[in-house]
Image (cartoon, helix red, strand yellow):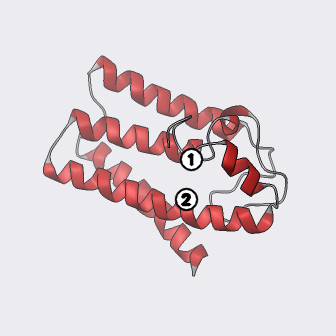
Amino acid sequence: MMTQISKYALVAILVLILYLLISGNLLSLSPAVIALQLLALGLSVWARRSFNPDQFSIHAEPKQGQILLNGPYRLIRHPMYAAALLLIWAGVVAHMSPANLLIGVIAAAIIAVRITVEEQYLRTRYPGYAAYSGQTKRLIPYVI
């Protein structure tokens, strides 16, 4: 059940980003929005490059290997989700409307569910995950 939720959550996030892009509500000419979205892209790439080649998975259920403690994972537990939220919310704020605000809220809720599912798997698979999660924040270093 949780695996299915995780798979649908990923598809839903991709659909929301695609909708914002196609509707012209993701990108902006604002230097601040461009900077935030480039930061999101950079964080995403940095996080992805932190994985060993055989360890990365798009599903919430982790593959074999150890807990990632390098790259952005030293500071936050879910940098790819943080990057997705930053990308989405920069676009939402730049093109504020009730519909875009709803998309941002839905994306945040979906990512919250996916984080919950993923952390259940991680706590089960890695005995050291509880200690790691006590030392790092989920999405924003030293904050959340």
Q: Which residue is mark 2?
A: 115
Residue 28 horizontal side relative to residue 34, left or right: left
Nearest-to-viewer mark from 2 and 1: 1
Q: Position of residue 39 (x, y in %)?
A: 48, 27
- In the rendered view, tell whether residue 120 sits above or below residue 142: below
Label for residue 22? Answer: none
User: Is 36 left, or right, of 43 in this rendering?
Assistant: left
Q: Are marks 2 and 1 in contact (CB under 8 Å)?
A: yes
User: How busy is the neighbourhood of tag 2: few (under 14 within 10 Å), some, or many (20 plus)?
Assistant: some
Q: Residue at x 64, y 32 (%)?
A: 46
Q: Residues within 10 Å of mark 1 (few under 14, many from 20)?
A: many
How far apart marks 2 and 1 lie (CA) works out to 8 Å
What is the x, y in percent for residue 137? 58, 43
Residue occupying the far right of the picture: 65
Q: Quadrant of the N terminus?
A: bottom right
Q: Residue placed at 69% from the left, 56% from the top?
A: 57
- Residue type at numbered disc 1: Arg
Residue 65 x %, y %:
85, 54
Residue at (51% x, 38% y) in the render: 140
For label 2, the SS is helix
Instruction: Name the foreground residue: 31 vs 76.
Output: 76
Q: Is residue 72 left or right of residue 141?
A: right
User: Mark 1 sits on what residue?
Assistant: 138
Evaluate whether residue 90 shows in this view: yes
Q: Position of residue 120 (x, y in %)?
A: 65, 67
Q: Residue 43 lies in what quarter of the image?
A: top right
| 2 w.r.t. 128: above or below | below
**Kind of residue at badge 2:** Ile
